Image (spheres, grey):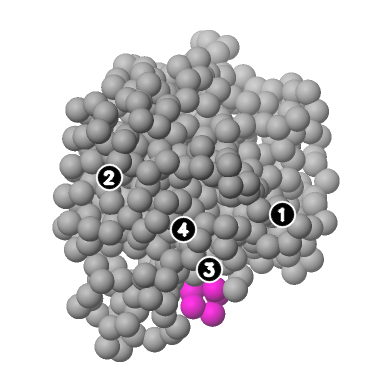
Amino acid sequence: MRLSATLTAGLLATSGLLATSAPRALAADEPAPPFDQVANCVSFGRAIEPVANGVSPGQRLVGQTQLWELSRGAGVTVAIIDTGVTPGPAFQGRLVAGGDLVEPGSPSPGLADCDGHGTLVAGLIGGAPDTTSGFAGVAPDVRLLSIRHNSMAFAPKGTRTPGVGGVASLAQAIDLAVSQRADIINISSAYCGPALTANDARLTAAIERAVAADVLVVVAAGNLGSSQTCTTQNTPGRAPVTGAIPATIPAALTVGAVDALGQPAEFSLAGPWVDLAAPGAKIISTNPHPTQSGQVGTIVGTQGDVEIQGTSFAAPYVTGVAALVRSRFPHLDARHVMARLMETADHPAGAGEQSIFVGHGIVNARRALTAVLSSEAGLTGSPGSPGSSGATEAAGSAPTRAAALPAGDVAAPSGGGEAFALVGSGLLLAVLVAAVLARSMRRRAALARAGSTDNVVASG
């Protein structure tokens, strides 16, 4: 059985077992603390035996361990706005209490993860290398700032309906991360609704403030089936039907998921707002059970052990790569980093093309750290500029998507599936509704301010 990690909390403990979170859609009002705990925490349930081999298809695709001579993320602070992060040896003193909107009076705000979801996310971003299993987070030297924003183990006071944390408190959490000098914010949550109504002015303004303060905001695209309003997939060449925030907010870097074969994951919500894709299936990450170390590839679900998957876990791969880039090129601002990640991705239909499934393509960590980009010409410290160091790669030599698939026993994707799923943006752009076109214009303007060239096509 597979578990599509939902985007509001992902995993929760109830009666000692983990399950997908309850459906959550956009809401005008949001309950405020204090909240009541109505479900057991991860620590109450049966612990999963750690895996012997911690090298997942996603880790092989990103290939971070081969790039650490260039960057390990040192000097970069990543804020994880999620269900909290449980301290442990995987984070080696780099985990910092950033805030708690679920239990504001917590003595260690953000360092209690009742659900387990945030710990899995943190492990992918910055988990320490494990020489026994081979597992490694993408950027093992980053500083991790944990802000607990949501949980499916809590309910509004006086109710038994699990699930706290909405768009208003998410905006508050973003401002909190910015005030604590985060360089990157990872948000592995989304709120679904009809495409043209999936928006919130407070959340949009918070993300725009973050980017204006030079903070890159990376968000998950959303999972089909995570709520009753998130069941219809969008179709290439047609106006979007389903939307999700913060995924559709122009200032955010939105990440969809691919499966272990490099194909768009069936659970990943597509849309013209998707900027990049990263591994989101067959996930292996830091064990969220507080009494065990190592990593897990499954979680205890209501009907047994289930695989971990979802766009919740694709976003942290991109966040980790962004941390490597920000550490290696500290002169690049948030918009330049966003442009670099999109321009160096493994494009599905050629340089500058995009699809509603994977955006500009699958993140390519090596090219993100080495490519010489014309859009950065004249920026001191960029690859190819006077005084820069390290190996460089010409931007025009982008490898094919198949060339970046995981090595080992993972089969290559079939050509037929790629032709069907990965579609260029020309036909789509001709029929998009005005709201989506407006988003594209705002993203183009943002990239233009970053000095990007025409071969970085704005989402839309």
Mark 3 or mark 1, which is nearer to you? 1
First in residue order: circle 2 vs circle 3: 3
Q: Nearer the viewer, mark 2 or mark 4?
A: 4
**Dot 2 alpha-carbon crowd within 10 angstroms: few under 14, some 14 to 19, many 20 or more:** many
Disc ID at residue 410: 1
Mark linked to residue 346: 4
Residue at 48% over, 74% down: 71
CA separation in Å, label 1 and label 4: 18 Å
Q: Where does the image place residue 197, in percent across and percent down from the top left?
A: 29, 20
Horizontally, is 112 left or right of 193 in the view?
right
> Counting residues from the N terminus, which is met first, the one under dot 4 or under dot 3?
3
The numbered mark at residue 133 is none
Mark yes or no: residue 204 visible: no
In three-dimensional space, the C-alpha distance between marks 2 and 3, rounded to whole angstroms, equals 26 Å
**Lateral position of residue 185 relative to residue 215, left or right:** right
Vertical position of residue 399 compared to residue 362: above or below: below
Q: Is residue 384 left or right of residue 33?
A: left
- Mark 4 or mark 3, which is nearer to you? 4
Q: Which residue is mark 2?
A: 251
- Majority secondary structure of magenta residues: loop
Evaluate if marks 1 and 2 touch, with contact meaning CB atoms under 8 Å apart: no
Magenta region: which residues?
67-72
Q: CA distance from mark 3 to mark 1?
A: 29 Å
Q: Amino acid at mark 3?
A: Asp
Image-based side of 293 in relation to 371, left or right = right
Please give the residue where the numbered disc 3 appears in the rendered image.
141
